Image (cartoon, rainbow, N blue to C red):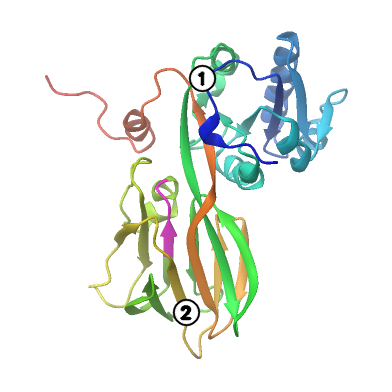
Amino acid sequence: MSKTPIQIQKTADFRCIALIGKYQSLEIADALRDLAVFLQAQGRHVLIEEGTAAAAGCHGCQTADFTRIGEQADLAIVVGGDGTMLNAARRLAAYGIPLAGVNQGRLGFMTDIASHSMLEGIAALLAGEFSPEQRFLLDAQVVRNGKAQFSALALNDVVINKGDIGRLIEVEVRVDGEFIYVLRADGMIIATPTGSTAYALSANGPILHPAVHGLALVPLCPHALSNRPITISDESRIEIQLLAQYDARIHFDGHEYFDARAGDLLQVQRSRHAITLMHPPGYSYFAMLREKLHWSGTPRR
């Protein structure tokens, strides 16, 4: 039975902790081994995701696949960047396990424990000093001739684009059954608040605070200047139909993709699953934006 993120209380009772890391990185391998030793010294039962253990050389540690982690772990610590966190979040979303991230990547919008103070940050988390925050995911499926062909979860975004072809594609966009427009563009991004600082930001989409109950529809290089990004309710159901004579590729968090044919229908809506991110003491979303996006960090007096 899956756990429910809403029911997680501010407690240090994380008895079984899973470690998940980016593969093929010596720096992350060293951090994972140090973290495993530290947690075991704290009396915690440690599981290391099997692919992570094989890549990091964590011999002598108990390994587990994502299913076992979901069923047994009270907390998952992700060591890597946002891509590693995205993968772990999708794999564990159905189990409701809270996630803490140690940033070993470039930006780290979701992995907000600094690598240089990893053990101090994890010690504070185990002592109950953390701030939980929920982030919702998207359910997406591709329908062809009335039958589902592919489905996936996405935490950041679902993107339909022109794939390998060197021309625009044409799609019909509907929200809650209402026709919005026919879009001629390189594609369209459907982004959650979590994904609003990812690909959608590069396409001039809006930044959505995590507390905003919204989705951003962001056209990619539209042929008409009037096709602008728009924010809609996260309760909306989005349908994007690929019009005749056009093929396209649909991406889910940049990790999975599906090659769509003319006439295929992409359906996207808010998932019933959510993840819980465990932020360290003093975490501020706006402070994170100032740091990652290089905004001015000194307020005027």
Q: Is residue 152 above or below residue 118?
A: below
Residue at coordinates 55% horizontally, 68% vertically from top-left? 250
Q: Is residue 129 left or right of residue 75?
A: left
Residue at coordinates 54% horizontally, 85% vertically from top-left? 262
- The Cα–Cα distance between marks 2 and 1, rounded to whole angstroms, is 44 Å
Quarter of the image with the N terminus in it = top right
**Disc 1 element:** loop
From the top left corner, tell me how far across and down residue 246 is, in percent: 51, 85
Q: Nearer the viewer, residue 136 or 115?
A: 136
- The answer to which quarter of the image holds residue 88 is top right
Q: Is residue 269 above or below residue 207?
A: below
Q: Nearer the viewer, residue 52 or 165?
A: 52
Q: Which residue is mark 1?
A: 10
Q: Nearer the viewer, residue 10 or 125?
A: 10
The disc at residue 241 is 2
Residue at coordinates 27% horizontally, 26% vertically from top-left? 297
- The answer to which quarter of the image holds residue 56 is top right
Tell me where the magenta segment starts and ends, as one range.
189-193
Ranked by sequence position, the earlier of labels 2 and 1 is 1
Residue at coordinates 63% horizontally, 16% vertically from top-left? 13
Callout 2: 10 Å neighbours few (<14), some, many (20+)?
many
The disc at residue 19 is none
Residue type for callout 2: Gln
From the top left corner, tell me how far across and down residue 65 is, in percent: 79, 40
Q: Is residue 8 left or right of residue 222?
A: right
Task: Look at the image and say whether residue 134 sits in the magenta stretch.
Answer: no
From the top left corner, tell me how far across and down residue 157 is, in percent: 48, 56
Single out the residue that lies furthest toward the left: 301
